[in-house]
Image (cartoon, grey):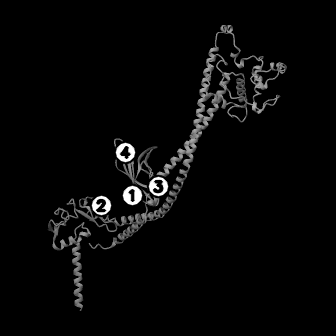
Amino acid sequence: MSLSFLSCSLLIVASSLIDSSVGKQLPRGVSPEDAALYRQGASHGKFTCKDGSVTIPFNRVNDDYCDCADGSDEPGTSACLNGVFYCRNKGHEVKILKSMYVDDGVCDCCDGSDEPAGVCPNSCREIGEEALKELEKDLNDAKSGLAKRSGLEKMAATTIKSWEKRLEQLEEMESSKAQQKAAAEVRKNQSEAKLERLRKSLTRLEEAAAAKSKKEEVPVAESQDTPVDEDDVPLEDVDEDVPLEDIEDMHPEDVHGAEEEEEEEDIYEEETEEERAKRVASQWIPGEHANTETVGEEDAYEAPYEAPDETVTTETPPVESSVEEEEIINEDVVEPTVEADDRMDLISRIKVWVSQMIARATGKVDLEQDLVVTKAKVEAAQKQFDSANQEFFTKSSELSTLQNEKGTLTSKLGTNYGTRNVFLQLSENCVEATIDKYVYEVCPFGDAHQSEGGRKTKLGTWKGFEGDTMVFTDGEGCWQGPSRSINVTLKCGSEDSFVSLAEPSRCTYTGVIRTPAHCTDELVKSLEREVERKKTLLQEYNVKDEL
């Protein structure tokens, strides 16, 4: 029984020695997937190429001469251009290297297996531990970003509702604003038409006054020989001793008896022209009949003014009086009341009104005074037009602002902001980064720019998403090159940040932005699995290599 146990033990030891011997015969650079092929060749002393094309003695494997067309006989040398070298890299990630990079003096594998022994240190454990730390950080950022993402979705829903509500309000307000603008435009047009009519009247009066002045400029000798008609003498040039019967006769109901005129004649001789005019005009001003009999309300105002006949005034070319002008005169008589017109002081209004009344009473039009009155009307009409024009401008601006806001909201509500509008918050903010000497600014759903020393260069305008990438095109053109463009890839992060930028080809840029909006539950689970795998790789670092 003891002999049987001893025999079994010897068989097990022998078997282990054989396996160990076979394991030691595995060529350099062989992957675990191909280990069985090379073990079989080692046990038979012959190796058949992986493509089955050639069978060679096993001792010609890794002899630095390429026998197989697929390069499978030289996994550990650079003899075959199409051969592959397997970096085991225990404690970190496996790496497949082209055989042409083997023994080139560069440490491509962290375990140093691609170079002769002693050339490269084995740094796989340190690199693996560093990679694990980065992965754990990404996992924590993803969890934080995922928590913020739910908040972004709620904010987006609230924002969308507020936009929709505001749009409804704007649509209701638009009709009212349009009506206000239309009414303001009518008032502006009316005041402008009135101003234009008054300007034309003023022009005609100025032309008539100029013609009259020119005609009155005659030689002194000639003027002495020429009889003067009383009707041609301007009202303001009439001698103070001229009786007032000519004026009072125009108003039979106010004519005093001859005896009264004779008694008052001496008193009137001492009056100035202005005092006499005011006294006569007081008969026409409602409520201003001092020391006179009360005048009935029906006699307070004259009948509408009729333009005098051409033969009544002077021989000067008559002032053309159209129906339009008569309407202006009638509707714009300046009455001496404080409330009537705040564009002229009270004394000026009284003087103008007195002059009008005297001109009407005598049946003559005083061009000089008519010019004063019409100029005052033009000034008042100009102020009225300016006010109406300003009101129209204000109402137009309000309507335009409303319509612009309405258009902006309509555009925003029609934009695709991703699942549950999670990327909407990106539309409200721009992400900046300083890389080298440039400042890059990316405004999702807007524009992207590059700045240097105050000069801003447009890299592109938002065109949309292509997968996880934001595309910006049609930027400023390069000198003798294409228009600038930039593609920005979104990745998960705890905060919005511009983490990298490159220019792989002239005027074509790529970048990476991290944002909570790109964090998902699936990503978090995937990172959790990857962390566990990394930990397993580090745990296997001290495990004996079975190959």
Marks 3,2: beta carbons within 8 A: no
Q: Are marks 4 and 2 in contact (CB under 8 Å)?
A: no
Percent coordinates x, y for residue 125 in the rendering: 35, 67
Decide which of 430, 385 is in the foreground and name it.
385
Among the two numbered marks 4 and 3 on one chain, the one whose residue lies closer to the N terminus:
3
Residues under labels 2 and 1: Cα distance?
Answer: 32 Å
Image side of residue 432 versus residue 97, left or right: right
- Is 424 drawn above or below residue 343 in the view shown? below
Image quadrant occupied by the N terminus: bottom left
Three-letter code for the amino acid on which mark 4 is drawn: Ser
According to the image, label 2 marks what residue?
Answer: 108
Which residue bears the numbered disc 1?
Answer: 468
Secondary structure beneath label 3:
helix
Disc with the residue nearer the chain's start (3 vs 2): 2
Q: Is residue 451 left or right of residue 196?
A: left
Which mark is drawn over residue 483?
4
The 10 Å Cα crowd at callout 2, few under 14, some 14 to 19, many 20 or more, is: some
Earlier in the chain: of badge 1 and badge 4, it is 1
- Identify the residue at image location x=60%, y=24%: 203
Upstream in sequence: badge 4 or badge 2: 2
What element does badge 1 sit on? loop
Please tell me how crowded label 3 is: few (under 14), some (14-19), or many (20+) other residues with Cα within 10 Å.
some
Note whether 171 is above or below 229 in the view shown. below
The kind of residue on which mark 3 rests is: Leu
Distance (Cα) linking label 1 and label 3: 14 Å
Rate crowding at label 4 as few (under 14), some (14 to 19) or many (20 or more) other CA atoms within 10 Å: some
Q: Nearer the viewer, mark 2 or mark 1?
A: 1
Contact flag, marks 2 and 1 (Cβ < 8 Å): no
Give the quarter of the figure containing the C terminus: bottom left
Q: CA distance from mark 1 to mark 4?
A: 23 Å
**What label sits on residue 426 in the rendered view?**
3
* Kind of residue indicated by mark 2: Asp
